[in-house]
Image (spheres, helix red, strand yellow):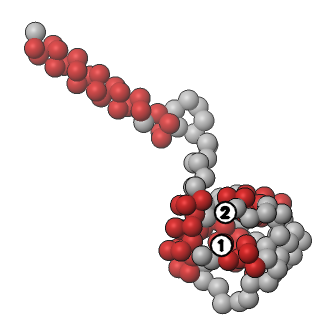
Amino acid sequence: MASGRLHALVTAALLGSVLSLGPVLGAGGDSARAAPAPSARERVYNGVNGEWRLCPYTGTHPELGKGHANDAVGHLQCVLNKVYAYRNVTADKIFGEATLAAVKDFQQSVGLTADGFVGPNTWAALHP
């Protein structure tokens, strides 16, 4: 009798473990679901510790907006993508819609006016 009870407890524990892994393994048919974006606190931590290693850049940090195309935009895109986990931003050096959306989201997450314009305050937040 004790053996049957132990077997039932072990089975229940294993089944519970497998079921709890469902979202990690993509259960439910949505395996392309993106991971949640990191919180502002995690983003600042990543910015402090990962930026220079992940996105080396020696240029200036000019004011940028939609339509700009230069190395500074490429650096911005790299930082947004690799440091702050905006995976939809491609480092193509062109400030387009995806970059604009990521900049606005980043600005809002750190308490700046979410205007999509990268000026001194946004650069300072990106480089804490």
Residue at the image position 42 percent from the left and 36 percent from the top: 21
* Type of the residue with mark 2: Val
Q: Which mark is residue 90?
A: none
Q: Which residue is mark 2?
A: 110
Q: Which residue is mark 1?
A: 126
Would residue 96 be visible to someone looking at this image? yes
Residue found at the very far top of the displayed protein: 1
Q: Residue 53's spot in the image, x, y percent?
A: 53, 79
Total marks placed: 2
Would residue 73 be visible to someone looking at this image? no
Residue 39: which quarter of the image?
A: bottom right
Q: Is residue 96 left or right of residue 57?
A: right
Q: Residues within 10 Å of mark 2 (few under 14, many from 20)?
A: some
Residue found at the very far left of the displayed protein: 2
Q: Is residue 112 left or right of residue 46?
A: right
* Type of the residue with mark 1: Leu
